[in-house]
Image (tube, rainbow, N blue to C red):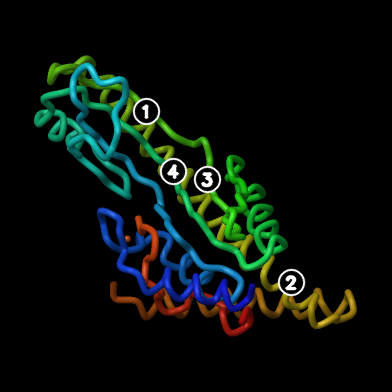
């Protein structure tokens, strides 16, 4: 099973990114890099969260993203002017959506998937779950119900006023802020869980384990601060090959 998992991981990470963007979102590069650096995990798809305005055909039973026009998309905060500019291009039924962070992780063992699921739920992603495929593939889906979906036009005609559009923009931006907080919490909790697991495998005494964990946490904060000081200044689909430079404390986790 170990060899099979390694083959799956190699094939997935060597594939071309199939998403519209073609790369990992910037706000979750560190999360994806951490997971892909571990022998027991690899990511199959991800999105940091986005606000999108899509235009579907009039009379359709629902807006399907693969059969519609994308009027606007942003992985950061947006303005009402952004949305209004997109709505001016609408000729069908436009819908505003906020889609929160989502991450699919293939895990080597069921215990690894359970750890990932526990971290996700404790970080606020309470709609997370596990699936086990017929071939033995174990996938953890990290997701939440922290979304938004509002129809704004019908047959190209705007259904709402500017004041309400301003309110929706504010609501979507607040959801984006909360989404980023949850991502940060997920990353911190994941690091802590992996460090604890590593130390437990060393079978250290309880008092020594806590001391070592505190020292590792201090090193992690220092490394992240150093990286930010030297930086000058991405949704990925199945098989993203973007495995960037490790962010924090990965020497302690491998």
Question: Which residue lies at the image location 33% right of the left edge and 27% below the top edge?
Answer: 168
Q: Which of the two labelled residues, at mark 2 and mark 1, occupies the earlier sequence position?
A: 1
Q: Secondary structure at mark 3?
A: loop
Q: Which mark is residue 100?
A: 4
Viewer-side label of 4, 3: 3
Q: Earlier in the sequence, mark 4 or mark 2?
A: 4
State the residue position of label 3: 143
Q: Determine the CA span between mark 4 and mark 3.
A: 7 Å
Disc 4 and disc 1: Cα gap in Å? 12 Å
Residue under numbered circle 2: 197
Instruction: From the viewer's side, name the closer residue of 251 and 217.
Output: 251
Q: Which numbered disc flags the more N-terminal residue, 3 or 2?
A: 3
In the image: residue 67, left or right of residue 198 = left
The reply to whether the C-beta atoms of the residues labelled 4 and 3 are less than 8 Å apart is yes
Estimate the spatial distance between the alpha carbons at disc 4 and disc 2, rounded to whole Å: 28 Å
Of label 4 and label 1, which has the lower sequence position? 4
Disc 1 designates what residue? 149
């Amino acid at each position: 099973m170990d060899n099979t998992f390694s083959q799956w991981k190699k094939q997935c990470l060597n594939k071309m990114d199939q998403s519209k963007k073609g790369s990992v979102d910037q706000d979750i590069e560190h999360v994806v890099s951490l997971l892909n650096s571990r022998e027991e995990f690899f990511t199959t798809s991800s999105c940091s969260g986005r606000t999108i305005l899509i235009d579907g055909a009039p009379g359709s039973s629902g807006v399907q993203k693969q059969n519609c026009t994308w009027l606007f998309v942003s992985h950061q905060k947006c303005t009402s002017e952004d949305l209004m500019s997109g709505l001016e291009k609408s000729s069908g039924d436009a819908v505003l959506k906020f889609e929160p962070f989502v991450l699919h992780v293939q895990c080597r063992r069921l215990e690894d998937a359970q750890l990932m699921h526990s971290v996700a739920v404790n970080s606020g992603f309470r709609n997370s779950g596990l699936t086990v495929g017929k071939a033995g593939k174990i996938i953890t889906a990290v997701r939440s119900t922290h979304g938004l979906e509002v129809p704004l036009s019908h047959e190209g005609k705007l259904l709402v006023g500017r004041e309400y559009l301003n309110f929706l923009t504010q609501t979507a931006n607040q959801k984006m802020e909360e989404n980023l907080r949850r991502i940060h919490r997920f990353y911190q909790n994941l690091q802590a869980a992996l460090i604890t697991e590593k130390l437990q495998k060393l079978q250290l005494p309880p008092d020594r384990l806590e001391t070592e964990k505190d020292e590792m946490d201090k090193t992690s904060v220092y490394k992240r601060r150093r990286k930010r000081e030297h930086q000058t200044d991405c949704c990925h689909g199945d098989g993203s090959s973007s495995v960037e430079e490790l962010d924090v404390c990965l020497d302690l986790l491998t």
